[in-house]
């Protein structure tokens, strides 16, 4: 048996019904949920849509509210916007909002223009015709009047006397209990729904039949009170079942057939159903007004079931205060146990729906909803929403949003700083305001190591050959004196000349072999004796020849020389320094250094600003303003 709906889904939650149609791809009654809702929200697709909680609440509320109406009324309530057709069935309230009186009507014309309860009872061709409930309709069926014509048991014309035991009326008849005072004396009568005893009629049918070789007698009693309540019971032989009340329209609307009175203590209650004892069936619901808060395990006694432990929907014992005094309690029977379905103001554990086909209870949904952070909790006014697209978050969450300025980096507030203050820049040109004070000049003085001079020796450990640089054509001057050479001669030769003769002077008596005697007016004193003056002579010509000259030894002597070399082309000179040592003395002294570094950096017109922007990922930021 399906579980009954006790209240509409999200009856106190926020609800927004979708429009009939929507051209932007959002949910509507005509299109339902579009394919946009299947797009992954994390994909960045601007058409992706999230399921809207208020719309889901409204749709479930609408469905469960209508089912609850069908469950309690059997037919839908009339409403003006419907296009009713012939034989459509509705209910309409002929009473007030706080004291309704529902009646059933059948549509007699297509597209009626009037409301059912406004149709006059005297109308000749009305739009609507009232249809009595089956229980009322049966009570209007005419029965035979007077005593049973087959078994005339009561000569008082079928009037039930005081103190009659209805279990003894086991024959076919129609009888009347004429007054409420007589009805109070009747034995085995049913308890009236409203608690007040009313006069009634009693219809009895009885017959016998044979089945499988056994003859049986069947009896059915039907009792109708003067205020419209109908009770039925049956018997096979002489054992009657309990009375079963057929609910009226007001009983269905008020749930009278679920009510019971309650007496007892905090942890033990005795319940008496308003409609009398009934057989216990799975799905049976009992409602009552509790007298006390429970303080521990809770038991009930109802009919033949005594001290039955009441369990929570998690099939565990109830905690203290799961049931509160002077509050409505609703129990359901599952065939073995009574289970707490709801308790206004009470506290009890709720089972978790973990099976694939298990639907959560209303309490579970409320508990989940209380734990789920709603839009206003996730993004209260003043919150920042970051996204990788430019879609206004109002289309996703509602509310009013303002886009933060472009090309800005988020930064937390400093002490005493107001939110949303802007500042900073992507790059800055350095000037002296950004550079700490400093200098580059160099001023230093060496220390005086000693008051006395210090001899420094530089040694050249080995001979080394050097080359001069190459110069252009040039000559070299030279001079000097040779060293003493001891006793020696000098020999030399003239250069070779062509054929020539030599002039010489001699005495007049020189032999002819010296040459041809020629007279020359020049007179020579050839032997320097100032005595015999000679004449000049010439030697006979000879071929090309040179002359050797020998200087007689002159003792130990030296020669001075000087001159200039001839001019030569560009050339270098090579010389070798032998290993040697230089020594010099450095006196005690100081060194003073004055100077500064050179200028560095770019000219004023070519300076590149220094970037101050850190590595980043560009996003779009919004602030909720309402």
Image (cartoon, grey):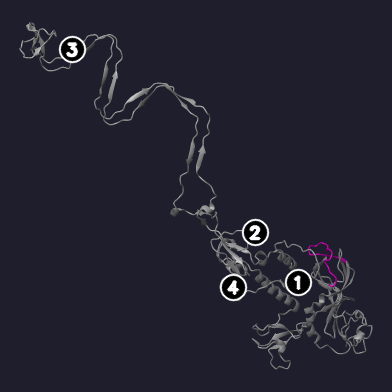
Residue shown at the point (75%, 77%) measured from the top left: 72
Q: CA distance from mark 1 to mark 2?
A: 60 Å
The residues bearing labels 2 and 3 have C-alpha atoms spaced at a distance of 119 Å
**Residue where numbered disc 3 is placed:** 548
Query: What is the distance, in whole Å, between disc 3 and disc 1 at their CAs?
Result: 162 Å
N-terminal label among 2 and 4:
4
* In this view, 368 is above or below 253: above
Task: Name the residue beneath numbered marker 1.
Answer: 4
Q: CA distance from mark 4 to mark 3?
A: 144 Å
Mark positioned earlier in the residue sequence (2 or 3): 2
Which residue is painted at 25% across and 24% down in the image? 565
Mark 4 vs mark 3: which is more N-terminal?
4
Residue 275 within the magenta-colored segment of the rendering: no
Quadrant of the rendered structure where residue 368 is? bottom right
Residue at image location 54% in from the left, 63% down from the top: 406
**Label 2: which residue?**
415
Residue 101 higher or lower than 283, as above or below: below
Report the span colored magenta: 303-326
Quarter of the picture containing the C terminus is bottom right
Which structural element holds mark 2? loop
């Amino acid at each position: 048996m399906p579980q009954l709906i006790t209240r509409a889904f999200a009856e106190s939650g926020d609800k927004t019904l979708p429009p009939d149609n929507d051209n932007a791809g959002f949910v509507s009654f005509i299109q339902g949920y579009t394919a946009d809702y299947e797009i992954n929200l994390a994909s960045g697709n601007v058409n992706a849509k999230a399921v809207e909680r208020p719309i889901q609440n409204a749709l479930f509320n609408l469905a469960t509210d209508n089912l609850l109406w069908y469950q309690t009324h059997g037919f839908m309530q009339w409403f003006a916007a419907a296009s009713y057709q012939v034989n459509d069935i509705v209910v309409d309230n002929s009473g007030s909002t706080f004291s309704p009186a529902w009646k059933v009507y059948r549509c007699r014309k297509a597209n009626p223009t009037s409301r059912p309860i406004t149709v006059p009872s005297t109308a000749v061709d009305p739009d609507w015709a009232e249809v009595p409930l089956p229980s009322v309709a049966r009570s209007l069926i005419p029965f035979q009047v007077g005593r049973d014509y087959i078994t005339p048991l009561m000569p008082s014309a079928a009037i039930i006397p005081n103190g009659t035991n209805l279990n003894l009326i086991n024959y076919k008849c129609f009888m009347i209990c004429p007054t409420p005072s007589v009805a109070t004396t009747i034995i085995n009568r049913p308890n009236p729904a409203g608690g007040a005893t009313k006069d009634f009629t009693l219809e009895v049918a009885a017959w016998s039949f044979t089945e499988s070789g056994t003859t049986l007698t069947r009896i059915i009693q039907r009792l109708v009170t003067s205020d419209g309540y109908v009770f039925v019971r049956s018997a096979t032989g002489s054992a009657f079942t309990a009375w079963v009340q057929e609910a009226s329209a007001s009983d269905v609307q008020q749930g009278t057939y679920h009510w019971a009175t309650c007496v007892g203590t905090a942890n033990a209650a005795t319940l008496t159903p308003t409609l009398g004892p009934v057989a216990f069936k799975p799905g049976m619901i009992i409602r009552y007004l509790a007298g006390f808060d429970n303080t521990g395990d809770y038991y009930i006694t109802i009919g033949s079931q005594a001290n039955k432990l009441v369990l929570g929907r998690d099939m565990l014992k109830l905690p203290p205060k799961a049931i509160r005094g002077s509050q409505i309690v609703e129990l359901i029977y599952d065939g073995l146990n009574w289970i707490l379905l709801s308790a206004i103001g009470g506290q009890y554990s709720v089972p978790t729906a973990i099976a694939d086909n298990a639907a959560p209870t209303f309490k579970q949904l409320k508990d989940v909803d209380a734990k789920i952070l709603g839009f206003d909790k996730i993004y209260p006014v003043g919150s920042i929403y970051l996204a990788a697209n430019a879609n206004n978050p109002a289309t996703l969450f509602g509310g009013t949003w303002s886009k933060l300025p472009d090309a800005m980096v988020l930064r937390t507030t400093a002490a005493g700083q107001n939110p949303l203050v802007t500042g900073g820049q992507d790059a800055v040109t350095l000037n002296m305001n950004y550079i700490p004070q400093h200098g580059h000049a160099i001023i230093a003085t060496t220390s005086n190591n000693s008051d006395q001079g210090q001899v420094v020796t530089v040694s050249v450990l080995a001979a080394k050959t050097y080359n001069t640089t190459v110069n252009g054509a040039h000559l070299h001057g030279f001079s000097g004196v040779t060293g003493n050479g001891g006793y020696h001669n000098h020999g030399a030769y003239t250069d070779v000349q062509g054929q020539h003769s030599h002039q010489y002077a001699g005495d007049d008596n020189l032999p002819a072999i010296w040459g041809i005697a020629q007279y020359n007016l020049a007179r020579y004193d050839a032997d320097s004796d100032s005595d015999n003056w000679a004449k000049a002579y010439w030697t006979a010509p000879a071929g090309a020849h040179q002359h050797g000259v020998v200087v007689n030894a002159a003792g130990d002597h030296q020669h001075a020389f000087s001159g200039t070399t001839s001019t030569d082309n560009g050339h270098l000179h090579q010389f070798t320094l032998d290993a040697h040592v230089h020594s010099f003395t450095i006196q005690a002294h100081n060194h003073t250094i004055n100077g500064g570094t050179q200028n560095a950096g770019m000219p004023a017109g070519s300076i590149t600003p220094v970037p101050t922007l850190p590595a980043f990922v560009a996003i779009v930021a919004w602030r909720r303003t309402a």
